[in-house]
Structures are given as C-alpha cells and as structure tokens.
Image: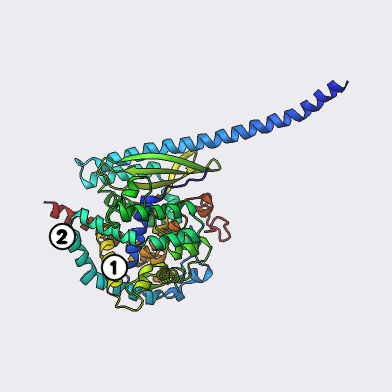
Amino acid sequence: MKITHRTGERQAKARRLGALLALAIGLAAAPHMAAAQDDPAMQADGAVDYNGTDENDPLEPMNRYFFELNKFFDTILLKPVATWYDGVVPEPGRNGIRNFLDNLRSPVILANDMLQGEWDRAGTTASRFGINTTVGVLGLFDPAADWGMPQHSEDFGQTLGTWDVAEGPYIYLPVLGPAPPRDLTGFVVDQFFDPLTYIYWDRPKTVPTIRFAVNGIDQRARSLDTLDQIERTSVDHYATIRNLYRQIRSNEIANGKRDFDDLPDIENLNFDTNEPESPSLQF
Amino acid sequence: MVTTLTIHRARGFLAPLALCMALVASAAQAAASTGDAAKAFVEEVSARAIDIISDKTTTKTEREAQFAKLLDEKADMERIAAFALGQYLRTPTPEQKAEYLKLVREFIVKVYVTRLSDYNDEKLDILGAKTKGDKQAIVQSEIKFTNGREPVTVDWWLIKNDGDFKIFDVNVVGIWLAQEQRSTFTSVIRNNGGDFNALLDHLRKQIDKAEAGDLSDITAAN
C-alpha cells in the first residue's frame, strides 16, 4: 500500500522551488547570530527531524552572514531583474525559455536516472529529449508532457542520496545558496555530465554563463510571490529556508514517495508526559 | 477408519486455518475502514476549508474566526504545539505554556489564512490512504486548479484522539508544515540561549506583522 506519486509536474515544481531557494537569497530577521554553545538543551541532544537529519549547522554564523549577503544582492539585483522579466516577457515566452533550459539539461537528468537504476524514468528522459528537440522545435515547446511523459528532474546530489550518502552539515554559499557537501559535490559532478562543459572547455564561458543567469532569473521570477509569502510568514527566515531546503531535497530523493517509516513516532507525544525519562520524546 | 482419521485431522487443521483467515480478513477490513474513515474525514475538512477561503463576501477577520473554529474541531492543536517545540518541549513554565498555546493557535490561523488566500473554488481529489495501526493515517490528495495551473499534492497526516481523527500535519508539495514550524521555533529558542520567552516575543511580532500586512493589502486593493 505504498503511496506512489506520479512525480512529473509536481516534481518539476518542487525542483523549481528547490533550485530557486538555492539561488535566491533569504531574507531574515536573523538578528541572533550566536548562542548555540550556551544552550544546555542543545548539548543534551540534537533534535532529529522527520527525515533523520538534525539541526546539523555548525557554521551557522557564517551561513547566516552569506544568507544576508545573498539577500542583499537579491534585493538590489536579482529580484528587480526577475520582476522586470516577469512583467515584460509574456508568459508563452517565459515558458519557452523554461522548456528550452529544461531540455538542455536532459543529458544530466538521463545520466542520473541511469545511475539510480531508474530505467523507466531514463527512458522517459531520452524520449522527451528526442521529441522536444524535434517536434518541440529545439526544446522551446514541451509536446512530450502532453503525450504522457511529464518532466522530472534529477541531479547527482539526489543520486548520492539514493545511495544513502548523508547530506552533511548545512552550508550556505554566496550565489549558490544552500550547498551542503553532498549537494555541492553533486553540483560539481553534474557539470561533467553536461555536454556544454566540454563544448566550452577551452573557450570563453559566455554561453554557460548566460544560461546560468537566465535560469536563475526565470526561477526567481517563478517564485516571486511564494518567496515573499515565506518571508512574511516566517518566525526565523533563515531557519525556515534551511528546513524547506532539506525537506524539498529528501522529497526529491524519494521521488515523492511518502512512508510512515520516514516519520517520527508521535502517538505518545504531549505536554503532560513531563517526566524527564519520558520515552515519548524520541524524535 | 482411515477416513474418519483424515476428517479429524482435517478438522483439527481447518479450524485454526479458518480462524487465521478470519483474523486476516478482519484485520484487512479494519485497515480498509480506517483508511475510508480517514478519507471521509479529509473530504469533510477540506470542503469546509475551501468554503471558508472561497467566500469573498466575508472579511478577513471573519474568515480567520471560521478557520480558527475549524482548527479547534479538526486539528490536534496540543500535539502540534508540543511537536513544534522539539527538544524544548519540557522547558516552558505552566504560564509560558498557556501563553504559547494561545499564540501558536493565533499564529497558525493568521499564517494559513494568508497563505491560502489565493486559492478559490478549487477542487480537492482524494487519491488514496495508508494506515499505521488503527490510530494513524496518511491521506493523499491533489488540488486541481480551475485556471490550468499544475495540480498541487497535499497529504494529510491524521491521528486519532478520543476516537476521532484529528489533523496532525499537512504536507504540501513535499513539505511537512509542522516540521517547518518546529525547525524555526527551536531555532529561535536556541539562538536566544534557550530563552523560551524569545519564542513568545517572536510569535507576537509575527502575528502583529501579519495583521499589519493585512492592512497594507487592503490599502493596496483600494
């Protein structure tokens, strides 16, 4: 009785949100940079999340600094450009650009589908690439999705995840955003699955750079409202983004499957089990 | 003689087998009915929530009040609030705990009425359910949009409290909301050296901010 989501579009959506969280900034109240060491509760145990991850953020002060830095560049540069792009380029144009960029990523997705042993999905990726590059006019359109082959994404960070490689401590970098060791490794390895890397190996990196920038602008434009709302409704914006990033990644690694085995035992959880040795607090 | 013996043997063997089968069947039935009850529960709650959010004749304050009522009836607020404190569950004094429960309820109402305000007349399809024992269920559903937007998956994690299902957590496109709250709540407490009052202050500020946000939205609309 496994709930298996057909991942396709939703996956694509979650991926976009994930990538955009990576690119985009943060906002953040973030006035409190320090203090983890003084905290007795923290020394006692690390709180383990639903997905078996814990707070695991030893570089939090540095991460918060870069988070603020990215937020600054988002405010003065990325967000205005994305807002302009969203307003000036009509929706069919933006969708064409998105489809084109997604199609260009097919070799990376295919390589990771295969490394994960997901042969059906690898077949889908290959067919999509063939159909969309030809019928879809060099990938500007996505007829394959209408024919029952929706877009999905994979990257080498996810592949490592399916091989049970842990995410490692949370790291937030300028420009790239959330980049814990597993996903940063994945980002680097993915470059080697990408034909563009070899085509432009000895040449000026104009085209890859433009692709990186347009991709970032498009993803930011697609999340203007979502990110504003997340900021507005977060008690601690940095911590919210950190948690969202982790949840989105584990959802991507599981390809949208959800299981009680991945969830904490909450049956005996309540305020009244107030004895210190209460067995109900195993999360 | 031989025949009788066989029959005796067969009886002796069949009875436990029948019992086993009956047990398996009833367990399966119980699982199915727990799942069905969970689905029916989600059907009802989501219909009410969509009604509240879609009714644009009400003011935001009225919508918040209706939503709060729905939460009180259908969500396991105490358990959610306890969960959101993570390893700090045992740190508040009774007064802090009472204040926290009050604020967290208000906070959730404000946040979700805001977050849900751009949903209108949407349709929620129940796709399936899985159960854990007879007390917990995850109901999988999908929101379809009338305007052609991509559907959104929503999973509902339910737990029985006094025999009735209550919502414990909701997963939207892969994100468990109570978990998201917990990570920020614990972060605020930790970054203030374990001071529980810091969380209460942050919640108050956030509630004020949401209210101020509402006002500016109204001004913009006018």
Q: Quadrant of residue B133?
A: top right
Residue furthest right in the image: B1
Compared to residue B17, the image places residue B116 above or below, namely below
Residue furthest left in the image: B222
Marks 2 and 1 sit apart, C-alpha to C-alpha, by 19 Å
Pick whichever, A30 or A168, lies toward us.
A168
Q: Are marks 2 and 1 on the same chain?
A: yes
Secondary structure of the residue carrying numbered label 2: helix
Tell me, for residue A211, which label it has, or none: 1
Residue furthest front in the image: A134
Compared to residue A89, the image places residue B18 above or below, namely above
Q: Which residue is mark 2?
A: A88
Q: Residue at x 32, y 70 (%)?
A: A30
Three-letter code, disc 2: Val
Closest to the camera, between mark 2 and mark 1, is 1
Q: Residue A169, image x and y in percent?
A: 46, 71
Q: Quadrant of residue A205?
A: bottom left
Q: Residue B78, image x and y in percent?
A: 43, 50
Q: Residue B57, image x and y in percent?
A: 19, 40
| Chain under numbered label 1 | A
Is residue B65 shown to the viewer in this render?
Answer: yes
Quadrant position of the N terminus of chain B in the picture: top right
Compared to residue A152, the image places residue A72 above or below, namely below
Q: Residue at x 29, y 59 (%)?
A: A100
The earlier-in-sequence mark between 2 and 1 is 2
Q: Residue B79, image x and y in percent?
A: 45, 51
Q: Quadrant of residue B194?
A: bottom left
Q: Residue at x 87, y 23 (%)?
A: B2
| Chain under numbered label 2 | A
Pick whichever, A200 or B139, lies toward us.
A200
Pick whichever, B30 or A281, lies toward us.
B30
Left or right: A222, with A279 as reference point:
left
